């Protein structure tokens, strides 16, 4: 259903370093890159993530209640993604753990304050 998600940034180089590290763990390369926009995704479909400086020229800000969830392959990858996020300028929003029957996730924010999680179900 979701083709891609775009998040705003005020420092594209800093944000790109954060998402390059996350994308490397998920084996997802950059698929588009322009002066004010970078996107990560896999050929053949699946949702991707884009980063951009806002088109209207105003400062990027986070959406209250907005979160991007990254599908992991197992609990160990959830932990690795959480650790990678924190090692690359992210902040903790809730360490990896069981969040209900069959749902395991770790929550973090990118350097611009956008909220993400890494999760598995089942």
Image (cartoon, rainbow, N blue to C red):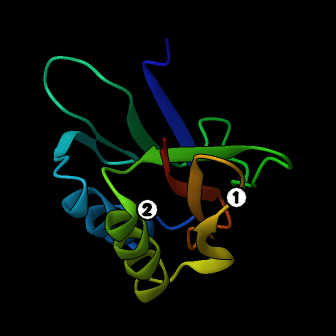
Which residue is nearer to you in this view: 36 or 19? 19
Which residue is nearer to you in this view: 64 or 26? 26
Residue 85, percent across and down? 45, 75
Residue 107, percent across and down? 62, 66
Residue at 49 percent of width and 83 percent of height: 86
Report how far apart the C-alphas of labels 1 and 2 lie in the structure: 32 Å
**Relative to residue 120, is residue 13 depicted above or below?**
below
Residue at 46 percent of width and 47 percent of height: 70
Disc marking residue 85: none
Q: Quadrant of residue 56?
A: top right
Residue assigned mark 1: 99
Is 28 displayed left or right of 86 in the figure? Answer: left
Residue 50, percent across and down? 42, 40
Residue at 57 percent of width and 59 percent of height: 105
Residue assigned mark 2: 12
Is 121 displayed left or right of 87 in the figure? Answer: right
Furthest residue to the front?
101
**Relative to residue 26, is residue 16 depicted above or below?**
below
Q: Secondary structure at mark 2?
A: helix
Crowding near pointer 2: few (<14 within 10 Å), some, many (20+)? some
**Is any part of residue 9 visible from this angle?**
no
Q: Mark 1 or mark 2, which is nearer to you?
A: 1
Dot 1 or dot 2, earlier in sequence: 2
Furthest residue to the right?
64
Q: Secondary structure at mark 1?
A: loop
Residue at 27 percent of width and 63 percent of height: 20
Is 1 displayed left or right of 16 in the figure? Answer: right
Crowding near pointer 1: few (<14 within 10 Å), some, many (20+)? few
**Is any part of residue 23 visible from this angle?**
yes
């Amino acid at each position: 259903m979701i083709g891609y998600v775009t998040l705003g940034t005020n420092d594209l180089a800093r944000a790109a370093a954060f998402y390059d590290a996350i994308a490397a763990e998920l084996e997802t390369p950059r698929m588009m890159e322009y002066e004010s926009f970078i996107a990560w995704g896999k050929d053949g479909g699946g949702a991707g993530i884009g980063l951009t400086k806002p088109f209207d020229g105003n400062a990027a800000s986070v959406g209250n209640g907005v979160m991007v969830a990254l599908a992991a392959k197992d609990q160990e990858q959830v932990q690795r993604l959480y650790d990678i996020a924190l090692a690359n300028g992210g902040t903790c929003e809730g360490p990896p753990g069981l969040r209900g029957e069959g749902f395991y996730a770790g929550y973090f924010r990118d350097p611009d304050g956008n909220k993400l999680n890494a999760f598995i179900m089942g």
